[in-house]
Image: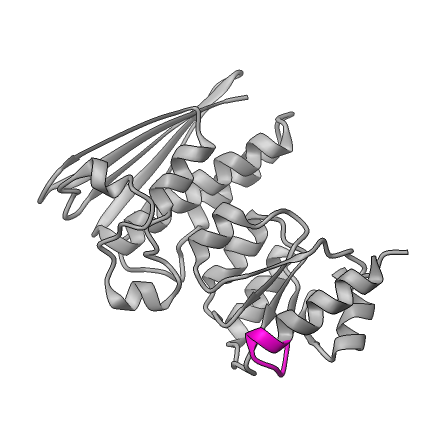
Amino acid sequence: MEVQYEIRGGDFSAAGQASSEIKKLLKQFNIDPQIVRRIAIALFEAEVNVVAHAYKGIMKADIDTDSIRVTVEDEGPGIEDIDKAMEEGFSTASEAVRQMGFGAGMGLPNIKKNVDEMILTSIPGSGTCLKMKVLF
Amino acid sequence: MKTNLKKLAADLDFEPLSGINLLDRIPQSAYVSDLLSDVIGKAQPGMLWITSQVHKNIVAVASLKELSAIIIVNERQIDDEVVKHAEDEGVVILASHLPAFETAGKLYIYLNRAE
């Protein structure tokens, strides 16, 4: 089963909608609630990253019998140094974003902790693509 | 018997702003932070969350982590839209009239005494 949601850059009032929809969908299946929680956390962080950093993005989820694969692709500034971005505490978020309590440099590490597979690629100046997989 | 949110709010003078019919929840400890990703990473389900953040995304975080309630400190004003969103998502918001340090201190004593 495939679903996809658009994410608008800069729109914090809508941030979390896509991940919330996917969480609701997963709750209808017979999946361990702890696994659903892990997926929801990873998707929320990924969604907030697009809202905080990119111009727009798309979250695509492919739900299978034994796993979920999610791709979050955005058009935006991209990431110059992915290893650095993965470090806890490193962030390039704006002051306005930090005021909201985001941009603490914990989003990507939080994603990594909650998924079984994570592949992050980026073309600086063009955009970022995050692929995640969680086994049920 | 463990204390529920209704008794806790009455005893500590926290004002319930949303989720009035969810106050039978039993809180499990608490977490203090204004960094949303910190809460997402470290808070445990059932915890109370003490924060001075009042924007809409706190509701998503509380729902995501299945926290028992958000406690807003410093008498910060919350938009009706945020309260409504919390109602829709089943998130309890309590307002404390004290700053975070005093709120956490009172709560720490209260929860340890109740247990």
User: Which residue is more in the foreground, A48 or B74?
Assistant: B74
Q: In which quarter of the image is residue B71?
A: bottom right
Can residue B92 be seen from the camera position used here? yes
Q: Which colour scheme is used?
A: one colour
Residue at (14, 48) in percent of width and height:
A77
Quadrant (top left/top right/bottom left/bottom right) for the C terminus of chain A: top right
Q: Where is residue A27 in the image (x, y as percent from the top left)?
A: 61, 35
Can residue B23 be seen from the camera position used here? no
Q: Position of residue B32 (x, y in %)?
A: 55, 63
Q: In which quarter of the image is residue A60?
A: top left
Extreme residue in the right direction: B1
Q: Give the range drawn in magenta.
A: B96-102
Q: Where is residue A49 in the image (x, y as percent from the top left)?
A: 31, 48
**Image position of A74 (left or right of B68):** left
Residue at (78, 69) in percent of width and height:
B8
Circle count: 0
Extreme residue in the left direction: A125
Residue at (17, 47) in percent of width and height:
A76
Q: Position of residue B51 (x, y in %)?
A: 53, 68
Q: Is residue B56 above or below residue A53?
A: below
Extreme residue in the top direction: A66
Q: Is residue A69 above or below residue B4?
A: above
Q: Tell whether position A16 is magenta.
A: no
User: Which residue is more in the foreground, A47 or B11?
Assistant: B11
Residue at (32, 56) in percent of width and height:
A103
